[in-house]
Amino acid sequence: MRRRQHLWRYLFVFAALALLMTGCGDPRLNSLDPSGPAGEMQLSLIKLSLGIMIGVFTVVTIIYVYVLVRYRQRPGQNDIPKQVEGSTKLEILWTVIPIALLAVLAVPTISATFSLAKKPPQGQSVEVKVIGHQYWWEFVYPQYGIRTSQELHIPVGKKVHFEITSTDVIHSFWVPNLGGKMDAIPGKKNNMWLQADKPGRYVGKCAELCGASHALMDFTVIAQTQQDFDKWVKAQQNPQSMATNKTLEQGKQLVAQNCIGCHAVRGAGFRYEGKKGPDLTGFGQRTTIAGFLPHDEKHLQAWLKNPQAFKPGARMPKIGYLDDQEMKALTQYLMSLK
């Protein structure tokens, strides 16, 4: 009796936790609410798989209950029921049915897989090279001669073809609202395309455990109208990175002394453009710092003073040796980059 009471208590606690957990998570990371044809295609496969699983579960459960009731041992019945072992008909039946179900699932799955990996015709898509780093994302637009990081701008209603790779460990490029994930593997180039059907901001994640700050390897996808996207491209091609007052000039010099070895700031007249870290061109127009921190001077200073406090394992060194005035000049210059 006590065992049953304990069992019911455990079941109640488990059910309560399961109910609470259904409300957890970021609603922006919902692959069941697609905003583009790639995501819709993958959602239809999920529904098909789920339908087949529910159908199989229902049929098996009905047969199981029927057999339990129909062939239960009755009082006074001591004979052995008829055995079906070796029945050719049953062997064929439970071999053919799973094969048929797998075929129903495999045909659309294979078709969708090849369709999503197929490169759109030249001139009808935007080409983007995606490069995963510990713990940030780099985006290169070869058509426009620009590169950026942490924020991916795409035009609405147009396919964007991605060539995905990594420089260190295996990452996984994933924008849940737009489509499924694709691994970023060192020395290998994977391909996929996505499309956003409406303007907005979509959250991107790394979906492969890649180190201490894997969970913080976020990025933002900004889907814009073609007109706004063209303006962004033009701004990236002609960045405003020159200092316009003494404080910004000091900040620019501090960037040259402390940052430019790893980062690039195009349009500022620096002789060298580092490529080890994120490209900082247009940094002032971004919406986040390091992919997830609020984009303001307070958080930027905190990040510069101790990056590892926010992203354990990040390769960016501390710049905690600058005094308050120097730190202010540095952050103001970075925020002025347009």
Image: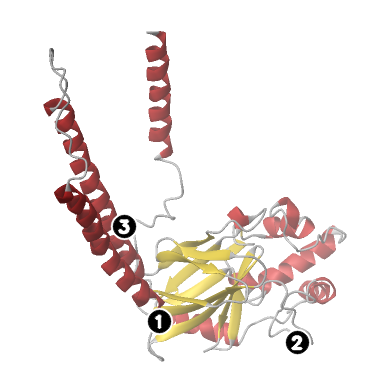
Distance from the alpha carbon under mark 2 to that under mark 1: 30 Å
Q: Quadrant of residue 208?
A: bottom right
Mark 1 against mark 3, which lies toward the viewer? Answer: 3
Q: Which residue is mark 1?
A: 226
From the viewer's perspective, is 285 left or right of 324? Answer: left
Where residue 229 appears, x then y in whole percent?
46, 80
- The amino acid beneath tag 3 is Ile
From the viewer's perspective, is 333 left or right of 175? Answer: right
Q: Is residue 197 visible?
A: no
- State which tag comes first along the sequence, 2 or 1: 1
Given residues 148 and 237, the one toward you in this image is 148
Q: Residue at x 16, y 32 (%)?
A: 67
Where residue 126 appears, x then y in whole percent?
45, 83
Tag 3's secondary structure? Answer: helix
- State which tag comes first along the sequence, 1 or 3: 3
Where residue 253 appears, x then y in whole percent?
83, 76
What numbered label is drawn on residue 269?
A: 2
Residue at the extreme top: 1
Tag 1's secondary structure? Answer: helix
The answer to whether mark 2 and mark 3 are in CB contact below 8 A is no
**Label 2 CA crowd tier, 10 Å (few <14, some 14–19, many 20+):** few
Q: Which residue is mark 3?
A: 46
Distance from the alpha carbon under mark 1 to that under mark 3: 31 Å
Q: Quadrant of residue 257?
A: bottom right
- The amino acid beneath tag 1 is Gln
Given residues 221 and 5, the one toward you in this image is 5
Q: Residue at x 39, y 70 (%)?
A: 199
Q: Residue at x 69, y 85 (%)?
A: 267
- State which tag comes first along the sequence, 2 or 3: 3
Q: Residue at x 60, y 80 (%)?
A: 147
